[in-house]
Image (tube, rainbow, N blue to C red):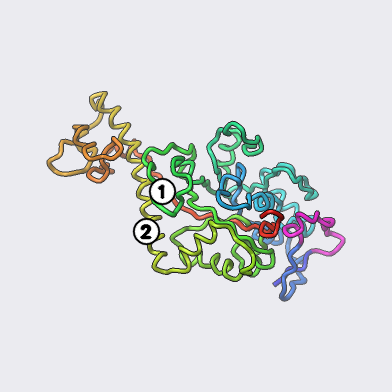
Amino acid sequence: MRVKAMDDSECEYESEPEPAMISSRTIVKASGPEFHLFNQLPTELRRMIWKLCLPSRVVELNHARWVAFDTLCDGEWTSIQNTLPPPISQVNREARAVAMEVAVFKWTIDSRHKTSKSWGLWFQRKKDTIVMYRKDVAPFGYYYQDYPFDEVVRKWFAKKALGTAVFSEMINPWNRYSGTQGLEAGMQHAPKTGWNDPMIILESIPIHARREEVLAAGVFGKLADEPIQLVDPLDAEHIRQYYQLYQDLPKTRPQSPSAQRFFEVYAKHPGRVEVFQGLVRDWIEQGKAREFQHLWEKWKAARDDNFSGIDHPEMIWIGPAAANMLDERILILGSVDGGINLKLFRPNETHSWVQANLVKSSFTPRIMFRWCADSCWSAPGR
């Protein structure tokens, strides 16, 4: 059903958009019956309906080139669309007012929906998820716009957001390209992200499709206004919806190697799906083991202090009955990295010291799907 907006005297439609942006900034003319009495509804009810039409987005805090490893698509088109005000802000004054009120950060975007082609942002409190692809400090030699926000602003975003997410390199910089294709060696000593229990993006899968194709699939928002999606890799049915979109696209249109590999492994061969999901579960266990290694460092500090103030320190670890749980040499025996041997010993999570010192991160994995409508497949030299 299509809502008939308020009368024409109350409408403020935007002027013709720039050609480069037209695919994402034009109004979607949905088919189906119209509801002509919308403007007769109480104002409060109309405003609630407008709010329900707002997208839930994944807001990027640094440049998407950090997830464009093996494709000529640098993610720029997707990132720009993702910063634009939602489509309902183009309908009329009332809808635009609702959209402007909900957004708590509208950098480079003014009230008349004029958008700078430079890096901007549209952020909604407790509705959008914040994502970081790289560490807080920009490496030497990259552009400043890769890191437009300082640490204070990033923390502010994290407090206001529905949730947070980081790319897997932030927790395992030594195995940048592994993703879900293999186990992530070195996870045990990976650094902290600085955010409280973020979702972890294992793979970034760009899908090149035209707007009408994405609208028909409905996997990037009902109005194609949610161009970045974070999907549970264990949710096979949800991922198959993206695979179906991928399959329905013209075979003459090249896709990125990462998309080809992912859908080849995940969706076309049911037996491989189980292998893939097994790798994800192994990754989660490795992540939890990383937290145990942080606990191990705290245990060594407590031991050096003669376990002062700790009741029954011999019960901190669970392992073979005959093992001396206070002897570091026993606890590290057979370890591949010099830390505690997690194949033999685990923390006793009922012990008061463990409960006070163990950081329980969920290590929630996600697959990032990115819609790109730029002609990456037909651009000269690509």
Above or below — where is 123 with respect to 267?
above
Amino acid type for the residue under numbered disc 2: Gly
In-image side of 131 versus 179 (left or right): right
Q: Is residue 102 visible?
A: no
Cα distance in 3D space between marks 2 and 1? 17 Å
Outermost residue toward the front in this view: 381
Q: Position of residue 110 (x, y in %)?
A: 77, 45
Q: Is residue 24 magenta?
A: yes
Task: Say which of 246 and 7 sits in front.
Answer: 246
Identify the residue at the far right of this view: 9
* Residue at left offset 12%, top offset 41%: 322
Residue 217 image offset from top left, x and y in percent: 61, 68
Residue that label 2 marks: 278
145 with respect to 360 (left or right): right
Per the rendered image, the range of residues in magenta is 6-26
Q: Is 249 placed above or below 82 here?
A: below
Instruction: Report the amino acid beneath label 1.
Output: Ser
Q: Tell which circle, 2 or 1, labels the residue nearer the N-terminal end.
A: 2
Picture coordinates of residue 175 (x, y %)? 44, 44
Residue 316 is covered by the magenta coloring: no
State which quarter of the image contains the N terminus: bottom right
The local secondary structure at tag 2 comes to helix
- Residue lying at 44% horizontally and 40% vertically, measured from the top left: 174
Q: Which residue is mark 1?
A: 362
Dividing the picture into quadrants, the one containing residue 18 is bottom right
Label 2 or label 1, whichever lies nearer to me, is 2
Residue at 63 percent across and 39 percent down: it is: 146
**Mark 2 packing: few (<14 Cα in 10 Å), some, or many (20+)?**
some
